[in-house]
């Protein structure tokens, strides 16, 4: 993809699922990668092995995003691996599901916001400051969700975090456009990952989802990687403040009865 070879990119949450798919595609495109994980050491080692098979340089870094005071040091470490970064992919996230009534003290709500919204805020801001100081541009991709656009029961914390991420991305795009820093959002629909493999491959569940999705199937982690590569590449040099939805048409279809 245009202008991606040699770009230095930090991907958060690269130890499984969509983040691992993004790492694979970006490695194929010749990016140098800093791969973040929190607890899944076996997963990040697997991602590292996959990307190095493409012959690119890569390094792994651990950080728990529920500890915001550690994020600046984490970012500085990530920046120093390749003496700078051209891209930041805020992918790490927790898909929390609970009713607000069961989370009355807001613990799950605050943890969800810490990982899904506060961490991207702090990392993106550190990235923008570093790019401006280095007199270079940069590209940020924030992995949001269709839950920012239309949601359902159990998702008040998750949907709020992702809607906040969409809104924040637009403001940052506006503020940082003058510095050549682009901020765009990826909004995936249903993408089976290790975490959801058992439930989504259950035949009844798969049938229900496939009927709801106009394209008739789930998305793949590599498709999310392709879209991320596009958003980081020079093909989207004039694109900023946008939300790219990849959901097989799920959101486009209203909740009307089937004909
Ligand atoms: N899969 C879908 O259908 C779907 C749809 C829309 C949006 N998304 C978004 O895609 C992103 C990736 O999710 P996924 O589905 O690929 O799930 P996943 O495989 O569970 O990946 C989540 C990643 O986030 C990291 N993470 C979780 N808690 C963290 C914390 N406290 N501090 C730092 N990192 C943490 C995990 O790291 P460790 O495992 O190493 O701890 C892991 O690498 C999320 O932002 C999610 O909201 C997913």
Image (cartoon, rainbow, N blue to C red):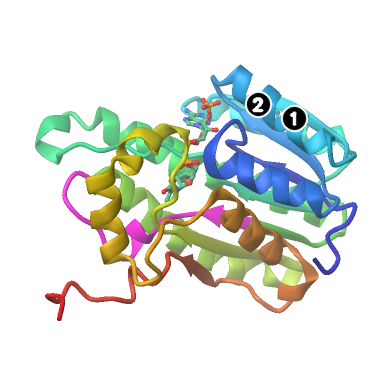
Instruction: Please give the name of the residue rendered at 76% of the width and 65% of the height, measured from the top-left corner.
Output: 233
Residue at numbered disc 1: 48
Instruction: Please give the name of the residue rendered at 43% of the width and 45% of the height, measured from the top-left corner.
Output: 192
- What crowding class fits label 1: few (fewer than 14 Cα within 10 Å), some (14-19), or many (20 or more)? many
Magenta stretch bounds = 141-154
The image position of residue 247, as x and y in percent, is: 42, 64
Could you tell me if residue 77 is visible in this image?
no
The image position of residue 67, as x and y in percent, is: 50, 25
Residue 50, by quadrant, is: top right
The image position of residue 99, as x and y in percent, is: 15, 39
Instruction: Please give the name of the residue rendered at 56% of the width and 21% of the height, measured from the top-left corner.
Output: 40
Q: Is residue 12 above or below residue 107?
A: below
- What crowding class fits label 2: few (fewer than 14 Cα within 10 Å), some (14-19), or many (20 or more)? many
Q: Magenta includes 145?
A: yes
Relative placement, left or right, of 82 versus 187 is right
Could you tell me if residue 72 is visible in this image?
yes
Asked if ligand 1 lies within 8 A of label 2, the reply is: yes
The secondary structure type at the circle numbered 2 is helix
The secondary structure type at the circle numbered 1 is helix
Instruction: Please give the name of the residue rendered at 38% of the width and 72% of the height, measured from the top-left corner.
Output: 249
Distance, label 2 to label 1, CA atoms, is 6 Å
Mark on residue 44?
Answer: 2
Give the quadrant of the N terminus.
Answer: bottom right
The image position of residue 234, as x and y in percent, is: 79, 71
Residue 132, by quadrant, is: bottom right
Q: Magenta includes 181?
A: no
Residues at circles 2 and 1 in contact by the CB criterion of under 8 Å: yes
Mark on residue 118?
Answer: none
Give the quadrant of the C terminus.
Answer: bottom left
Q: How many marks?
A: 2
């Amino acid at each position: 993809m245009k202008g991606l070879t040699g770009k230095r990119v930090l991907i958060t949450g690269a130890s499984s699922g969509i983040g691992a798919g993004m790492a694979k595609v970006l490695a194929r495109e010749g990016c140098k990668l800093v791969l973040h994980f929190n607890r899944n050491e076996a997963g990040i080692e697997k991602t590292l092995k996959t990307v190095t098979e493409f012959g690119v340089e890569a390094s792994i870094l651990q950080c728990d995003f529920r500890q915001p005071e550690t994020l600046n040091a984490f970012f500085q470490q990530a920046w120093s691996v390749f003496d700078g970064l051209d891209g930041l992919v805020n992918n790490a996230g927790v898909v929390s599901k609970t009713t607000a009534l069961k989370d009355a003290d807001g613990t799950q709500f605050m943890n969800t916001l810490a990982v899904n919204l506060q961490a991207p805020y702090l990392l993106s801001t550190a990235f923008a400051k570093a790019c401006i100081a280095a007199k270079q541009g940069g590209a940020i991709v924030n992995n949001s969700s269709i839950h920012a656009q239309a949601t359902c029961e159990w998702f008040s914390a998750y949907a709020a975090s992702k809607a906040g991420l969409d809104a924040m991305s637009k403001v940052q795009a506006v503020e940082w456009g003058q510095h050549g820093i682009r901020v765009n959002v990826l909004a995936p629909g249903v993408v089976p990952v290790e975490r959801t493999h058992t439930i989504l491959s259950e035949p009844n569940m798969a049938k229900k989802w496939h009927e709801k999705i106009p394209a008739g199937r789930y998305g793949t982690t590599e498709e999310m990687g392709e879209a991320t590569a596009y958003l980081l590449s020079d093909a989207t040099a004039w694109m900023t403040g946008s939300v790219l939805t990849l959901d097989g048409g799920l959101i486009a279809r209203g909740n009307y009865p089937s004909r």
